[in-house]
Every structure is written in structure tokens, then in C-alpha cells.
Image: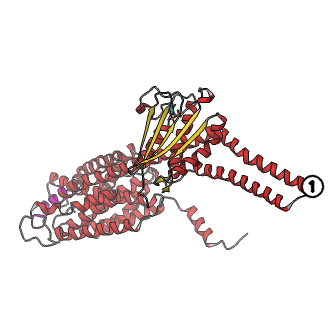
């Protein structure tokens, strides 16, 4: 046995013995104490109630992020911090304990309401969650706890403020704290625990510019002496562009920007600066609370709405990508018989060439020139097989879109080479009518191959019932001003429905069909800035025309 465990093992052993809530409890204790100090620093003297009282909100955020079974430990962890912070301020012990109870009550009510509707740690990533947070944690919990709190103050006989005055002051102070502190902690916790992805330097520069600008504006508006008794209401709107910018960057940026503005505003008023100074402390506190609450709620909702929309769009894009890949794989499955047949040809050639070489060697009449010719044939056949597999490999892969400059005629040839085996088995003759020197296009090779392959496979399917002599597939390429056109024409059954219906997802007339090929092809072509159109031909059959913007000729 190893008497001296390695340090890593020791850390692991210690971690095993530590309860999982302990780090969170320690963080709550330290955070609560610092939040209380901040609360005192933001108190308007001699007004006894802070404009913003952050410890309760910090406690609420901790509960919202923790598992329900650790809640009691976290509330307990706040007690020493509460005693340490409050007993220094000369408040009677009974009042200090009373406030601890009402603070814990507020955090518990706020967290319990949210937990009843949202499973697991709160994430402000949907309007539903944001609404539950606003109504439960930022409105209902401060409302209930401020009645209890004011009653306790009255019972203990601390101060001489009227009951309703206490309720009102305490309510607004806590609403503002919940609105400022909880989103800040919850959104940054989500950032910290999300899967890390590379943040571009431009994003850091943008955030730096935003927060520097906001800080400057806040200092100018809220932290400088105001000469006039009442500042023009216009000054309150000065931070708005920065707050909107932050909302566009996401809930974490928005919560941070709002917290910055809140602290700057209150700090100014506490030091007799900015547009809110110069009134009674009660009036100053009330005006600031109303102003900051009115700014915070819509900005938070806006940032969450924008983030939710971009998340939904991201998910939809990913699903479309998966669907495109799935339908491509399904189509390759349809072609597999033909591809096997196509691979068989070079393999057979390799075998017969190799057998011939063996024969010459066995009879000791191998002419080196002949052997070299046989080997060249083997290499060529091997390359042909390799090309088929290479073409397939790219189509099977599910990768990001990769735009490159492509020759449309080459694309058509590659697609027909891939489908050649299938077309031959179906007895379909192919006529390639490609206009030479077509301008190039900028496109994703795999996606365009998917479109063309889909049109070719559909055309082949449509000619299944045709007499063998009519099974003709024409692939035509042409160019007009600034555009290239690829037309896939068959002499099959044609279609009876409108072209719009043909391109609808899940429209299919085939027993095993998915009905996705044409709708995906259309969205691919549209994403390339082009158009995909279908027409029936008078003499029978259908024509599908792909039009793409052409690159200017070099
Ligand atoms: P799927 O091939 O799985 O049915 P598609 O979206 O590729 O899905 O095609 C949808 C339907 O459009 C087909 O089932 C068929 O009825 C019709 N269609 C497509 N191409 C042709 C064509 N060349 N000729 C006649 N009908 C066609």
C-alpha cells in the first residue's frame, strides 16, 4: 500500500468527504457580508433604509441556483455574515435577528415560487422563466416580506417611521435589489457553466467599448453636481442607447449594464451628486427606485426575448442541417445498389488484370512492357473506384457549410458519375448538354450536389413506368446575364399538383418516400441566392430548373 498518497489523490479524498453544499455555503457567507457592506454604503443618511438592499437578493439568487435540499444550509450560512455586518452598525440584537428572519423569508418565498414552476436551477433564457422570476422573486417575495419586516420594526420599536411608510420603503428597496442582483448572478452562473466556446476578440472589444461608454455616461449624468434644482428629464435617457446595446449582447451583458447604472445612480445620490440629490432622503430614494425599476424591467425582458429568439433560430438551423443530412443519406441509400454496381466494374477490371499478370508470370513469358501496361490498367481502375468512394464520403459527412468557387459543369458531371450505376441499372440514357465555358458559382459543393442528385434520382423514379426507349434524362446547362441555369429534364409521368405543393415538405407520391428532397433542395438553392422551379412538359415529363447567381468572369 502507498503510505504517501499523491497530492491529486489527497484533494480527491478530501473532496469526497466534503458535503457538496459547503463551497456554495461559504460563497453565500462571504457574498452576504460583502452585499450588506454594499447596502450600507448605498444608504442615504439619515434615512434608515437603503435604496437597494443586496443581501436578500444574493441569498435568493443562491437558492435559485442551488438544489432544494441545500437551501437550509445556505440560509444558515448567511447567519454569521448577517450578525457580523449588522451588529457593527449599532442596531439592537432583537432587530438584527428579526431582519435575519425576514431576509431569509424573502429569499425563501422568491425561490420557492420560482421552483414551483421551473425545474432545476433558474436560467433566464426564456420569457416564461423571466416572467416567473419577475412575478415571484422580484414582486411577490418583497411584497410579503416587507409587511413582516415593517411589523417587526414596529414591534421592537426601532426608529419612529410610520408602518406604511416602512412597508413602502422596504418594498421598493427590495424590488430593486432583486431586479439588480439576481439576474446578475443567475446569468453569469449560466455563462460560467455553459459549454465553453471561443469568444472572438471583436466581442471582447465590443463589450469593453459598451461598458466604458456606459460608465462615462453614468458618471456624467448621475455622479456630477447638478446646478439646476431639477434636471431636464432628457438626461435620464442618456444611458438608454448603451442599455439597448447591452440587451442585444445577451442577458448577462444586460444585467451587468443595469447593475452598473444602478450603482452609479445611487452612489451619486448618496454623495449629494446627480439629478436625484437635493431632496429629502425619502424622496430621493423613492425617485431613484422608481426610475431604476422602470428602466430595469423592460431592458431585462428585451434581452431575454432577444436571446430566446436567437436560441430558437439556432436550434431551427441545427435541425434543418440534421434534416438535410438525413435526407441526403436516405437518398444515397436509394442509390446504393447502383453504386455497388459501379464499384464492381473497376474491381472486376482489377481482378482480371491481376489474373492475367499472374498467368504471364507463371508461364515465364512476362514481357516487362506488357506487365507495365497491366499495372497501369490496375492503377486506373483503382483510381476510378477511389473517386466513387471519395465522392460518397463527402456526401455522407455532416459538416458545416463551406462556400467555394465551383464550375457548374464539373458539378453536373460528378453527380451523373455518382448516379451512373443507378441510371444504367434502370436502363436510362443520359444526354449531357453542357454549355462550354460557363461562369463559375460560389456555393457549397456538397449541398449543390445534393440538389442535383435529388433531381436526377426523382427524374429516374418518374421514368420507372416508361417504355425503355423513352427513358431519356437530359441535363442541360446554360448561362444568361449574371446567372447560370441547370435544367434536369425527364420524359416521365410529370406531376399533377401545383409546383408549390410539389415543394412542400412531406409531399410524396412514393410508398417509401420522405417527401423532403424537393423542399430541402429549394431551401438550399434559395440560401445560395438562386431559384428552383418545376414545370411539366407538354409531351410528358417534368423539368426542374436550378438558377444560381454567376460569379463575374475573370
Ligand atoms: P420523395 O422523393 O421522397 O417523394 P421529393 O421531395 O424529392 O420527395 O419529391 C416529392 C414528390 O414530387 C415525389 O414524390 C413526386 O411525386 C414528385 N416529383 C419529384 N420529381 C418529379 C419528377 N421529375 N417527375 C414527376 N414527379 C416528381
336 and 209: which is toward the camera: 336
Q: Which residues are magenta?
A: 277-290
Image x and y of residue 8, in percent: 61, 70
Indicate left or right for 496 with 348 as reference: left
Determine which residue is flagged by label 1: 362
Does residue 230 lie above or below 448 as drawn?
below
Snapshot quadrant of residue 363: bottom right
Q: How many neighbours does mark 1 have within 10 angstroms: few (below 14), some (14-19), or many (20 or more)?
A: few
**Residue 436 in sight:** yes
251 and 524: which is toward the camera: 524
Does residue 519 lie above or below 284 as drawn?
above
Number of numbered markers: 1
Residue drawn at the location 53% of the way across and 41% of the way down = 475
Residue drawn at the location 73% of the way across and 45% of the way down = 345
- Provide the major secondary structure of the magenta segment: helix
Indicate left or right for 174 with 125 as reference: left
Image x and y of residue 65, in percent: 41, 54
The residue positioned farthest toward the right in the image shown: 363
Q: Is residue 61 magenta?
A: no
Image x and y of residue 152, in percent: 24, 54
Amino acid at each position: 500500500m502507498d503510505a504517501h498518497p499523491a497530492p491529486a489523490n489527497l484533494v480527491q479524498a478530501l473532496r469526497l468527504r466534503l458535503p457538496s453544499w459547503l463551497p456554495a455555503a461559504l460563497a453565500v457567507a462571504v457574498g452576504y457580508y460583502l452585499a450588506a457592506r454594499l447596502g450600507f454604503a448605498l444608504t442615504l443618511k439619515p434615512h434608515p433604509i437603503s435604496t437597494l438592499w443586496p443581501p436578500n437578493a444574493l441569498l435568493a439568487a443562491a437558492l435559485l441556483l442551488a438544489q432544494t435540499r441545500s437551501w437550509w444550509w445556505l440560509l444558515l450560512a448567511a447567519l454569521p455574515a448577517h450578525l457580523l455586518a449588522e451588529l457593527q452598525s449599532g442596531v439592537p440584537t432583537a432587530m438584527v435577528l428579526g431582519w435575519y428572519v425576514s431576509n431569509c423569508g424573502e429569499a425563501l418565498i422568491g425561490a420557492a415560487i420560482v421552483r414551483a414552476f421551473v425545474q432545476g436551477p433558474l436560467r433566464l433564457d426564456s420569457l416564461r422563466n423571466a416572467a416567473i422570476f419577475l412575478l415571484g422573486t422580484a414582486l411577490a417575495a418583497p411584497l410579503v416580506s416587507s409587511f413582516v419586516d415593517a411589523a417587526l420594526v414596529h414591534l421592537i420599536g426601532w426608529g419612529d417611521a410610520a408602518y406604511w411608510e416602512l412597508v413602502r420603503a422596504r418594498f421598493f428597496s427590495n424590488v430593486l435589489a432583486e431586479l439588480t442582483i439576481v439576474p446578475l448572478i443567475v446569468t453569469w452562473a449560466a455563462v460560467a457553466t455553459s459549454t465553453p466556446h471561443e469568444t472572438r476578440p471583436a466581442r471582447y472589444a465590443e463589450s469593453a467599448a459598451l461598458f466604458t461608454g456606459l460608465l462615462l455616461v453614468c458618471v456624467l449624468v448621475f455622479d456630477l453636481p447638478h446646478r439646476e434644482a431639477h434636471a431636464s428629464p432628457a438626461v435620464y435617457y442618456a444611458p438608454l442607447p448603451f442599455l439597448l446595446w447591452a440587451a442585444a449582447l445577451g442577458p448577462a451583458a444586460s444585467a451587468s449594464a443595469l447593475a452598473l447604472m444602478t450603482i452609479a445612480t445611487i452612489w451619486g445620490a448618496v454623495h449629494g451628486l446627480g439629478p436625484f440629490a437635493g431632496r429629502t432622503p425619502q424622496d430621493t430614494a423613492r425617485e431613484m427606485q422608481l426610475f431604476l425599476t422602470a428602466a430595469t424591467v423592460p431592458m431585462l425582458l428585451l434581452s431575454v426575448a432577444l436571446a430566446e429568439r436567437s436560441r430558437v433560430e439556432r436550434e431551427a438551423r441545427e435541425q434543418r442541417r440534421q434534416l438535410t443530412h438525413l435526407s441526403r443519406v436516405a437518398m444515397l441509400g436509394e442509390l446504393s445498389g447502383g453504386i455497388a454496381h459501379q464499384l464492381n466494374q473497376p474491381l472486376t477490371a482489377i481482378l482480371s488484370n491481376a489474373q492475367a499478370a499472374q498467368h504471364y508470370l507463371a508461364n515465364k513469358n512476362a514481357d516487362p512492357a506488357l506487365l507495365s501496361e497491366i499495372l497501369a490498367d490496375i492503377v486506373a481502375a483503382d483510381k476510378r473506384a477511389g473517386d466513387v468512394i471519395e465522392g460518397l464520403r463527402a456526401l455522407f459527412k455532416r459538416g458545416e457549410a463551406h462556400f467555394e468557387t465551383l464550375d457548374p459543369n464539373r458539378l453536373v458531371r460528378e453527380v451523373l458519375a455518382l448516379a451512373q450505376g443507378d441510371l444504367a441499372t434502370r436502363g436510362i440514357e443520359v444526354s449531357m448538354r453542357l454549355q462550354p465555358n460557363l461562369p463559375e458559382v460560389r456555393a457549397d459543393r456538397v449541398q449543390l450536389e445534393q440538389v442535383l442528385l435529388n433531381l436526377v434520382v426523382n427524374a429516374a423514379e418518374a421514368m420507372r413506368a416508361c417504355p425503355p426507349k423513352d427513358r431519356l434524362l437530359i441535363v442541360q446547362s446554360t448561362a444568361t446575364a449574371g446567372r447560370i441555369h441547370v435544367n434536369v429534364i425527364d420524359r416521365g409521368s410529370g406531376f399533377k399538383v401545383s409546383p408549390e405543393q410539389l415543394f412542400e415538405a412531406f409531399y410524396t407520391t412514393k410508398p417509401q418516400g420522405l417527401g423532403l428532397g424537393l423542399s430541402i433542395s429549394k431551401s438550399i438553392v434559395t440560401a445560395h441566392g438562386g431559384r428552383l422551379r418545376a414545370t411539366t412538359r407538354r409531351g410528358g415529363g417534368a423539368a426542374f430548373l436550378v438558377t444560381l447567381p454567376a460569379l463575374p468572369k475573370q
